[in-house]
Image: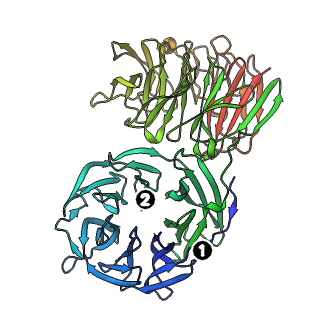
Amino acid sequence: MWPIASPLALRTLLPLQMDYDSVRGKLLAAALDNNNMPQLLCLLPSDLSTVWALSLPSHPTALTVAVDGSRAYVGLLNGQIVQVDLATRTVAASFAISEGEGTSYFPLSLAIRPGAVDTVAISTGYVDTANLVKFHRLGIWQNGLPWPQILEVGPSLNNPAGAVRFSDASTLITLNTESSDNAVLKVLVGDRTLTALFPGVEGRGFSQSLDMLGTEILLPAGLRIDPVQLKTTRWVDGIGGSFLALPDLGELCEVQLRRTNAIGGFELRVVTTGIARQEQIRRLRFDLPTLQPTDGRSPDLVNWQALGRGRVAVHLYERVTGRTFLLVLDVESVAPLTAQSAPVTQGASQGMQLTALSHAMSGLAYDAEGNRLIASVAPSAGPTGCALVVIDPASGAIEARYLLSSPPGSVFVSSTGRVAYVCLPQERALQQVRLGSSPGLGWKIGALWDSVLDVAISPTDHETVAVTIASQRVLYLYTGGARVTAIGENYPDIRYVSSVAFTGANSLVVADSYTTNQDLQHYSITSGTITETGRDKLPAAFLFSFGRYFDGLIYTYREWATTDTAQAGGWILPPETISSLQQIGYVSAPAYDSVALSSKVSGATVLSNPNGGSLSFDRLAPRAVSPLGGDLVGTRRLVVQDSGFASILNTAFRTVIAGTNRWATLCTPPEATDATLYIVTDS
């Protein structure tokens, strides 16, 4: 849960820039005082009282403190850099970066070169006629004098250097704070030379700061980057806030500002995440009832700064009113979360037994060979998060846990061999997990063009998988983690592929459910080559998406069409009969989006209503589906009222068979840190 706390300190101050003097344990803030006069303030983190103040000649725009605590550099709007001796609290030197009459470049970000406090990298910008800040130049100044080379980091480098940081003495990292293209660029620092390396790392743009997590780069969006290889190592998932490092605790901290009601009032949510395992460690929130939206706009979370062990300074700004708040939050005051099993509730209705587990799951599959449910668990689960778990469907007990490198998504399980595959969306990767006699993580496919959309596992070889990705353009084939072949990868051989399934050892079907082509594509696999063998038209453009191919049956997740049997509402049929479809139609409401088939004979299924109100668990025959009302043929129905989840629009469902006469539905509301797993047994 979210314990409510009070800020350790609160002050109405406009800190345009902040940095931490770790040697003295003080917060430095370049700010304007109550008389609109610029100052460099040294603040005590415990109560934000002023230890000392130093007047500045112009509006501050950038600030950085040397690791050894000897110097601070302050950038000013008038194009000056002020070097401050922190021991004597005096200005040691100053120099200008504006070049010639009429130029208006000002320092936007500063970084002191490791081991050389007289050398500072400066990212500069200017304000154009539309009052927009533009970033154009990156250079290094030593003893107040510029190196001969200035990088024009505007259109020529396609990487506006809105933030800079040294990862070591010879490597400068720049961050694009203007757009999402080439978000991070690496610049080699030589003997008075700068060399930009391409390509950069694409990531989530509009980040305003760079942080270091040990030897890794940390972006506020949760992206961790190896500065040597300039490759993403991990994506950290969370609550949608901004990340910063708390290395003294071995944790990351995420801060998010949320509105608490429609007319005003806000809260600051803070989550800390373990660096090693990426599980959530602490959660707390701070009520800020005095914050109000103005002109319909919420306050901005402008800046944040770690202050030693477990403390975080946060700067909030109401853009229209100009009111500002500087808060210091004591994260370590909240006890770490304890690892607990998911709460289990049980009940019965109309001959059906119901088990409900409250857990932050994001994907679900069934291991028929081991008679176990396999679920992916989000980091919001706390110390048990960011993992793949094995659940006993009879009791709901978690029997095994496999830690993963990043937040997991969908899960797929082989029909034999006890092997699971879990999507890692933020890494654009697919992780194999062995569940059998030698359990543990297997091989991983990484660095795909996009996140994994669907996975089909060969019925005769659990090491062979077919994969589609979110761009819906490519069908991949992998064996043992090694790429065998792909189709649709290179222009002009473009096709749209979404869902994929094996129909035999060497045959595949792929559904295009996102374009007007709306076809079912057939492929054969021969000597490591995928060849298209034909196509069938599908009904319900933009609404059809088959979930699984099972024992000769395919079925939809969403709208149901009408089959040639003229039975309303049902479309469950062998793919060979698609060409004989008649009277194709739609069922508009209620729309069921999750189905599970056990066989052509029993046709057992669970239907979940995404439009709110209830979850419906039905037992039916394959060609007698009718969500239009009334009892279904051969059906037992259990309706679960769940105001906490099922009544929320856009709730996601995932339904699987979980054994003989048993089904499981994962019910996840939008932007939730929790979910409910319903296990239903027909007695």
Which image quadrant is residue 208 in? Answer: bottom left
Task: Using a 10 Å C-alpha cutoff, classify the residue at mark 1 as few (fewer than 14 neighbours), some (14 to 19) or many (20 or more).
Answer: some
Q: Which of 560 and 313 is in front in this view?
A: 313
Disc 2 residue type (three-letter)? Asp
The answer to whether residue 629 shows anywhere in this view is no
Say if 301 sits above or below 250 in the image.
below
Say if 659 sits above or below 172 in the image.
above
Between disc 1 and disc 2, whose residue precedes? Answer: 1
Residue 488 appears left or right of 502? left
Say if 126 sits above or below 499 in the image.
below
Residue identifier under label 2: 211
Q: Which of 460 and 66 is in front in this view?
A: 66
Q: What residue is rendered at 28% in x and 30% in y?
A: 490
What element does badge 2 sit on? strand
Task: Using a 10 Å C-alpha cutoff, classify the residue at mark 2 as few (fewer than 14 neighbours), some (14 to 19) or many (20 or more).
Answer: some
Disc 1 residue type (three-letter)? Ser
Residue identifier under label 1: 46
